[in-house]
């Protein structure tokens, strides 16, 4: 039982340090200093947190983080700087909580606590990056307040019920292992869109021609989708790089190309070649509507049907604003005709390795 309590305290402190290292140290040190809590003998080394210098420095750094954490994009830069600081701090807190345990156990727990701190830090940083895609600051403020409350509440739980804290850490790690890849893909998408927005102006000339060339892998996928080997059997009207928002037909955060063929005004094709396989889908347009939506990080092309509420959204980088606007206008002209086929139904042929 005592071992489980040690594990709960060590890993719990590591997880909280990943959210906010300075607040964790400041509140824990202040609680010991003011004798709000009495440390059990096995946690005697945590008394070092009550040193006035440590409390003052942690309080000052938390004061800075309190404001940086509530400003869009400043919080992401702050998280980037702390990508190493928080896991290392979490490992040190865990080792201090272990007291006089065996050195090998100290190293193992330090590694585990550092990994847990890195997980919570990554989840926090990823959530902030996703939230920053919205230009309003209120979501950042609300999320920051929730994180601070979670740290204070988590410290109380670690002190009063360390075994329950251990259970929550285990559940959290399982959550990260299951949803981590999806979260990572979403973060990668937001980071790429943000980078493209910063790198390039969003005022591409409207008279610039729509691109018709496809990378080799995408071109081969398109021919496989059409079951044609002759490159002259169809002509590409336009092909723009984009990222999928996710639907029943297309997995979220797939990076590929949306393609229109000259002899097929009633459909579009999406082709994507990734590390884990290939995706190729055909979307029938009859009976559908289209919309062009300008967002903070991306230009969105939306294909939807009102009756059955089917929707496909494609993200384009901001420098392609004029091209996406022209594509949306062309599609609106096409879709003005009465529907002749079920909307947005996929007719893709299966491809080996298709996701």
Image (tube, grey):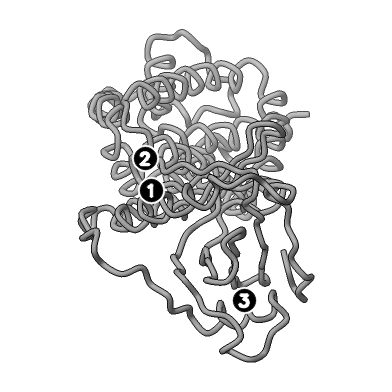
Cα–Cα gap, marks 2 and 1 = 6 Å
**Quadrant placement of the C terminus:** bottom right
**Is 266 drawn above or below residue 221 in the view shown?**
above
Q: Which mark is residue 45?
A: none
Q: Residue 27 lies in what quarter of the image? A: top left
At horizontal 71% and vertical 42% (from top left) the residue drawn is: 174
Q: Residue at x 71, y 23 (%)?
A: 164
* Image position, residue 287 (x, y; %): 65, 43
Image point 58% across, 36% down: which residue?
10
Q: Are marks 2 and 1 in contact (CB under 8 Å)?
A: yes
Q: Residues within 10 Å of mark 2 (few under 14, many from 20)?
A: few
Q: Which residue appears at 47% of the width and 38% of the height?
A: 127
Position of residue 116 relative to residue 4, above or below, is: below
Element marked by disc 2: loop
Coordinates of residue 254 in the picture (x, y in percent): 57, 59
Q: Nearer the viewer, mark 2 or mark 3?
A: 3
Q: Earlier in the sequence, mark 3 or mark 1?
A: 3
Decide which of 93, 330 is in the foreground and name it: 330
Q: Is residue 243 left or right of residue 82?
A: right
Name the residue carrying label 2.
Answer: 295
Q: Callout 3: 10 Å neighbours few (<14), some, many (20+)?
A: many
> Which image quarter holds the N terminus?
top right
Q: Position of residue 131 (x, y in %)?
A: 42, 35
Residue 200 relative to residue 45: left or right? left
- Mark 2 or mark 3, earlier in chain: 3
Dot 1 falls on a residue whose secondary structure is strand
The residue labelled by disc 1 is 299
Q: Which mark is residue 222?
A: 3
How crowded is the residue under tag 1: few (<14 C-alpha within 10 Å), some, or many (20+)? many
Image vertical order of residue 185 relative to residue 15, above or below = below
């Amino acid at each position: 039982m005592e071992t489980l309590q040690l594990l709960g305290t060590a890993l719990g402190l590591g997880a909280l340090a990943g959210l906010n290292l300075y607040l964790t140290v400041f509140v824990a040190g202040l609680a010991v200093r003011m004798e709000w809590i009495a440390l059990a003998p096995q946690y005697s080394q945590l008394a070092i947190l009550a040193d006035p210098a440590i409390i003052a420095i942690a309080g000052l750094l938390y004061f800075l983080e309190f404001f940086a954490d509530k400003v869009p994009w400043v919080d992401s830069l702050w998280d980037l700087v702390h990508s190493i600081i928080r896991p290392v701090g979490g490992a040190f807190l865990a080792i201090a909580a272990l007291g006089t345990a065996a050195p090998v156990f100290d190293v193992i727990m330090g590694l585990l606590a550092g990994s847990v701190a890195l997980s919570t830090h990554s989840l926090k940083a990823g959530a902030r990056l996703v939230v920053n895609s919205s230009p309003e600051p209120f979501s950042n403020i609300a999320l920051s307040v929730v994180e601070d409350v979670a740290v204070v509440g988590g410290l109380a739980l670690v002190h009063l019920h360390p075994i329950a804290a251990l259970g929550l850490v285990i559940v959290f790690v399982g959550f990260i292992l299951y949803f981590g890849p999806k979260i990572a893909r979403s973060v990668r998408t937001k980071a790429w869109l943000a980078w493209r927005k910063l790198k390039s102006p969003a005022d591409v000339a409207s008279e610039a021609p729509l691109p018709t060339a496809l990378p080799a892998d995408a071109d081969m996928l398109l021919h496989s989708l059409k079951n044609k080997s002759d490159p002259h059997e169809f002509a590409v009207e336009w092909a723009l790089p984009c990222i999928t928002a996710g639907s029943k037909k297309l997995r979220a955060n797939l990076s590929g190309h949306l393609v229109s063929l000259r002899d097929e005004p009633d459909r579009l094709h999406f082709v994507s070649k990734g590390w884990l396989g290939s995706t190729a889908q055909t979307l029938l347009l009859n009976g559908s509507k289209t919309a062009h939506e300008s967002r903070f990080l991306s230009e969105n092309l939306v294909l939807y049907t009102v009756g059955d509420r089917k929707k496909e959204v494609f993200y384009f980088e901001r420098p392609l604003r004029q091209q996406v606007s022209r594509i949306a206008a062309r599609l609106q002209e096409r879709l003005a005709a009465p529907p002749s086929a079920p909307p947005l139904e996929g007719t893709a042929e299966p491809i080996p390795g298709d996701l």
